[in-house]
Amino acid sequence: MSPRKNPTPNFYAGVPLDRVDQRRADAAYIESLVSDPACVIVPVWRAMHLVAAEAEAVWLRRAEAGHLVELARESVFLGLRGETAYLAVDLSHLEAPEQDPVLASHGSFQDLRAVGPVMNRRDSAILAYARGLAHWHARHGFCGVCGSATISEKAGHQRRCSNPDCGAVHFPRTDPAVIMLVHDGGDRCLLGRQPIWPPGMHSTLAGFVEPGESLEEAVAREIYEEVALPVAVEDVVYHSSQPWPFPSSIMLGFYARSDFAEPVPAEDEIESAAWFTRAELRASPEDETFKLPRRDSIARRLIEDWLAEG
């Protein structure tokens, strides 16, 4: 497999906002943007988003929904779309957000993974961005160095320890994970299945990058750990990446070639693994006997691009 030139962005990539990083520390400037009546409020509730009928993201204006900023557990400036600011507000501490008349009149809170595949891609990218930051704030209220409470700074893009003797600064974290389609250089690729997945679903192999290893080393290690192929992994070629804030990953997609050998699934992780031909995958019944990964995943993209090249 050869590297793809300028591939189309994957789902949840391509956030259509200017993040204005150079101005985030200017509190007066940020306040002037987010206090504007036209500022777009992006509600996040327990990792879910406000969605209207037909999987449309709901964008509330501050003129209508300014009270949500006051209610929010955390607010994060996302960026500018043209001259309009977008502000994520985390309402996860509310027990019944549907009791708020503004929220109730516009839609309901839904999991992005349920609606993302059919939502406008630019809208879903903004929601994924907001979800990732809300998740990070919710889990970093205390300093990992000394244990003191942290406070939000730079419009929600860093947290600082409140202990003056510590003062450690913490930034949003994204966990790198490699995800790879293993092929034999010909007409077969290797897919596995985890027992927690929906019935019939098969996918590419994947795993987190460990400290002190390159991405290519992570690809080879994860392949061996998950299916124990007794042959060398070669031609590790980068494909593309995908933000995957479920809860906090960046998926780094690769192709990797390996000679055909019988896979031995890791019992604690992989239920089954097998080689499949292009013809078999093109004829996938997409039911509980066999189905490809979800359409918004980079795993699906890796498989579809591999099918298109053969």
Image: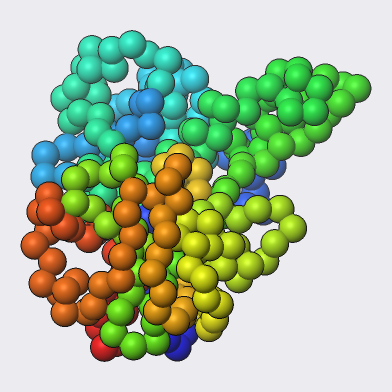
Give percent across and percent down for residue 67: 38, 19
Quadrant of residue 71 in the image?
A: top left
Question: Which quadrant is the C terminus positioned in?
Answer: bottom left
Q: Is residue 3 something that shows in the picture? A: yes
Q: Is residue 244 something that shows in the picture? A: no
Rendered view: 37 above or below 277 = above
Query: Does residue 144 appear left or right of residue 31 in this picture?
Result: right
Q: Nearer the viewer, residue 92 or 301?
A: 301
Give percent across and percent down for residue 6: 43, 81
> Residue placed at 68% from the left, 22% from the top?
142
Query: Does residue 106 appear left or right of residue 9 in this picture?
Result: left
Q: Nearer the viewer, residue 82 or 176?
A: 176
Q: Nearer the viewer, residue 107 or 22?
A: 107
> Residue placed at 54% from the left, 81% from the top?
234
Q: Residue furthest right?
A: 165
> Residue placed at 49% from the left, 33% from the top?
135
Rendered view: 37 above or below 232 = above
Q: Nearer the viewer, residue 200 or 297?
A: 200
Quadrant of residue 261 in the image?
A: bottom left
> Residue placed at 60% from the left, 55% from the top?
209
